[in-house]
Image (cartoon, helix red, strand yellow):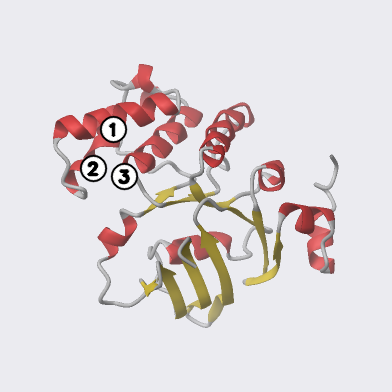
Amino acid sequence: MGDMILEIRHLSKSFGSHEVLRDIDFCVEKGDVTSIIGASGSGKSTLLRCVNLLETPTSGEVLFHGKNVADRSVNTAEYRSHVGMVFQSFNLFNNMTVLENCMVGQIKVLKKSKGIARENAMRYLSQVGMAPYINAKPRQISGGQKQRVAIARALAMEPEVLLFDEPTSALDPEMVGEVLSVMQDLAQGGMTMLVVTHEMAFARDVSNHVVYMNQGIICEEGTPAEVFGNPQKQETKDFLSRFRKN
């Protein structure tokens, strides 16, 4: 159990009378790459936002190393420094350069010196192939490049887990590959990742754990071989029928 990082227990979320998530349970261990798949509107992004406390769960627990972070006494900013988030819309600061985007969180949240923050930022920007663009503003680079900067910015905080909320959905098709390639490299390097995605090939080939959601519940979960190769539920079979071509 020492390698358990996140445990989601009986998590539910309602907006008014609309129940978006219902009794969600799953775990993330160190080194796991968990892909959350399902049709639009099945609650995947809301689940991720609850894990990162961007939404407050209506009931249930989000345990980080055994401690319930959904408890109001928890320092949310401190928790988020351990659990990074990459958004579908990049969320870069448009008035800052690529380099500044990757330094600001380290300085403000982690209290690192500018020198150390710059060194870390450069290391992670190099890792995602964005070192040549450090002086560019977000408006001067492509969507795929923005997302790679967003990944570097998240990595620069040295999180234990990275959450990805449909990181390729806002990209032109030709840019999807460059972002998935960076994510695949991270997975191979042992980064713990929780990925909401419509990229079925990534879920099948890169993940070690797949969670299929349908109408706010976990309909089925298991290894990619189990979920893609031998789905048990009819809803899973129907959802995957168009993707199950090798």
Q: Amino acid at mark 2?
A: Gln
Considering depth in this image, is 11 or 190 the residue closer to the camera? 190
Q: Give the x, y percent position of residue 104.
A: 22, 40
Local crowd size for mark 3, using a 10 Å CA cut-off: few (<14), some (14–19), many (≥20):
many
Give whichever of discs 2 and 1 has the lower sequence position. Answer: 2
The residue located at (51%, 77%) in the rendering is 9
The residue located at (45%, 47%) in the rendering is 87
Left or right of residue 102, residue 108 in this image: left
The residue located at (23%, 42%) in the rendering is 106
Q: Secondary structure at mark 1?
A: helix
Q: Give the x, y percent position of residue 60.
A: 47, 80
Residue 222 falls in image quadrant: bottom right
Using the image, tell me which numbered label, if any, was put on residue 106: 2
| CA separation in Å, label 3 and label 1 | 9 Å
Using the image, tell me which numbered label, if any, was put on residue 120: 1
Q: Are marks 3 and 2 in contact (CB under 8 Å)?
A: yes
Q: Amino acid at mark 3?
A: Met
- The quadrant in which the C terminus is found is top right
The residue located at (37%, 28%) in the rendering is 125
Give whichever of discs 3 and 2 has the lower sequence position. Answer: 2
Choose mark 2 or mark 1, whichever is in front. Answer: 1
Considering depth in this image, is 172 or 80 the residue closer to the camera? 80
Using the image, tell me which numbered label, if any, was put on residue 157: 3
Q: Give the x, y percent position of residue 153.
A: 35, 38
Give whichever of discs 3 and 1 has the lower sequence position. Answer: 1
Q: Are marks 2 and 1 in contact (CB under 8 Å)?
A: yes
Local crowd size for mark 2, using a 10 Å CA cut-off: few (<14), some (14–19), many (≥20):
many
Q: Secondary structure at mark 3?
A: loop
